[in-house]
Amino acid sequence: MAANRRVDDVSSPFYLHPSDGPGLVLVSQLLSEDNFASWSRAMQISLTVKNKLGFINGTITEPSRDEAVLHNAWVRNNSIVISWILNAVSKDIQASIMYSDSAHEMWKDLNTRFSQTNGPRIFQLRRELSNLTQDTQSVNVYFTKLKAIWDELSNFRPSCTCGACTCGGVQKLNEHYNLEHVMAFLMGLNESLTSTRGQILLMDPLPPINKVFALVSQEERQRSIHSSHNEVQNSLAFSIRGDQSVQRSVHNQVYTSAPKRKERGFCTHCNIYGHTIDKCYKLHGYPPGYKAKPRYSSLPQSRFSVNQVAAMESPLDYATSGSTSQPPFVSSDPVLANMSAAQCQQLMAYFSNQMAAKKQVSTQQSHGDEAEVAHISCVSGICLAASLHESFQPHYWIIDSGASRHICNDKTLFSSLHKVNFARVILPDCSLVVVEYMGDVCLSDDLILKNVFYVPSFKFNLISVSALLDRLPHTVIFDSTSFLIQDKFLKKIGKGSKIDVSATVWHNRLGHIPQLKLDILSTKFSLAMDKPKNNSCCYICPMAKQKRLKFPISSTVSSHMFDLIHCDIWGPYRVESHNGYKYFVTLVDDYSRFTWVHLLKSKSDVLTAIPAFFHMVKTQFNCNIKMFRSDNAHELQFTQLFSQLGVLHQFSCVYTPQQNAVVERKHQHILNVARSLLFQSHMPITFWNECISTAVFLINRTPAAKLNNLSPFELLYPGKLFDYNSLKVFGCLVFASSLPAQRSKF
């Protein structure tokens, strides 16, 4: 009964509220590799609220099984806490702690793996603190980041917890820490808050850090309100009624019937009211952080109602010191605002020349029939197809219903040629070409093209349908594949046909597919294309589809045992094994393909593993290793050892694992078998080293086709048979027998 009351007591750590389910998430941030300090703090706070902190710090131990009620309550609470921890870690970490028996063991495991020692973490926090500034952040965000670093640093700082200090040393120490926090906070503020920082530093004594933050934050809010108020004012248009006040200017002073205003200064350099020449920014330079302010016109207002819009005056010096007639240059474009006066003058001169040239052309066009403009439209696609066609010849003519003039690029085709003035051709890309000559081209006895423009820079000869039918009673008939030109008596005087799309165009359209597949598509879907030439070649395909040449397959095999040993190191694996291993080195005999694996806790352990392997071969098999092949790893360069033993060391080229392919493929084989054993046995990932050792043991006793269906074990130990009936399924249940000294009669 007492145990039941203890379990049902709300204040008991064994009490479970109906809301305390296994799916509850206590913290919002999951545990990763670099946030254990903040995550553990949040978890401890949450578990303290749930009254379950003793299950992770070990103060609540497992009750005896004789106390069934308390033991069952402890098991339920322990499982609940384990589920809460699993819900608060990332998926990569869940697999490594899934099989922990108690929450205390799970917490110790996480603390051992992810908690950093004091030195590196303090160094990291100090460096972040020294590099942190406000920059573009708000004061609130900047202070929050500082506060997080200060709080974490305080956990590493020793403090007095006896509460019996009477000398005042603890209070002075806290005041010193507050001074450091205030100085760090003020040093990282932007230069725009210099005045506020100076006022705070003049206070004696300095206020607490929270008070300093409140003062700076209040100043930031006031500035934001002031800037938004100015933006609203600058966006409004205002009007001044002429009948409300009459103004007149005498000796640069303004008199009005309204209440008298304070006299405003006048700058004789920039001719603007509001400042004098000794304070003119344009003459003496702009101060750091200067922002242009809205300024209205300084000229006297007329007596009529005039609507004006406030504009931001550009800091650009728009005129010389003697200029008084031009207003300031105003631009909202940041590119123009950053241009110098010389650049602006060059830009204005360029625009002036362009406008003058357009005006001259329009004047020339107004002279009458002498000015002619030819427009070429709807021809870009035809010209592109023709240029890509392999059978297209330079003397071919293209008929275009959108062009307004005939064009020819070959001077020898003209029967007559004369000079023209003010004739231009506008190409499809909107470029303008000046035409100097025009004449007649005789295509046949019955078809003569009149007024053909000679444009040598144009790549094609063009027949304009509108120009052909304008002065001659001809008829042009189009169908899907050809066209026909007839005179007024319906006599055929010209004809042409559609050029099929070349195989090169289809090759480009379909992403440079092979010619064999292009022929299949052409036959299957009746694509209109001509046959490719035998000597046609696409220069794009070799550049885009080039591949690295294959490495030749090595068929050389050693003739004797231990003539050649292949070696490589695998790792590190992200999860340490249950006994601390993270690497393993693999050694493969080239003749028998027998494999040896040595598990390593660090790469430096290979310095003892390789010499031990050489001694084992010499002792057990009475053989000497002749050659040793590996990559360029620094830890595998046993120069002194190999020189003493007379062993040749062969290195593979850098980033060329194909030259060490025997051991590389052996790694793949080992990992495939090891993963199969792990998935089959459902063992924790920390037992991966046992899977590797078992996999190598089984591979050495598995027949291979390259070994004439013999196993590496049979080649290494000829005449010795292995008892396969002794094998058991990896991960199966095994009962161990107690030692005779520990047995009892019961």
Image (cartoon, grey):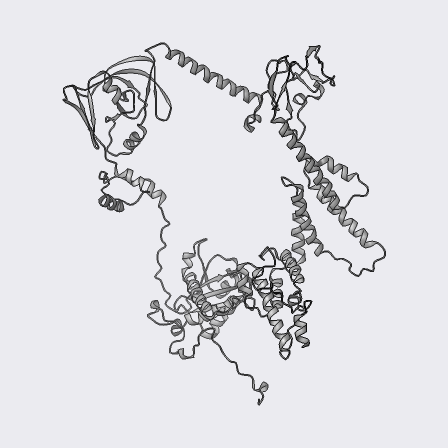
Residue that appears at 55% across and 58% down: 90
Name the side, left or right, on which 307 lies relative to 415: right
Front-most of residues 554 and 507: 507
**Residue at the extreme bottom of the image, as rendered:** 745
Q: Position of residue 407 (x, y in %)?
A: 28, 21
Which image quarter is the N terminus in? Answer: bottom right
Which image quarter is the C terminus in? Answer: bottom right
**Residue at the extreme front of the image, as rendered:** 243
Q: Position of residue 288 (x, y in %)?
A: 67, 30
Is residue 538 visible in the rendered structure shown here? no
Name the side, left or right, on which 202 lies relative to 16: right
Front-most of residues 129 and 567: 129
Front-most of residues 232 and 425: 232
Q: Quadrant of residue 429?
A: top left
Whether residue 217 is situated above or below residue 12 in the rendered picture: above
Front-most of residues 383 and 633: 383
Whether residue 343 is situated above or below residue 545 in the rendered picture: above
Name the side, left or right, on which 341 lies relative to 725: right
Q: Quadrant of residue 73?
A: bottom right
Q: Position of residue 276 (x, y in %)?
A: 71, 19
Is residue 528 visible in the rendered structure shown here? yes
Name the side, left or right, on which 285 lies relative to 385: right
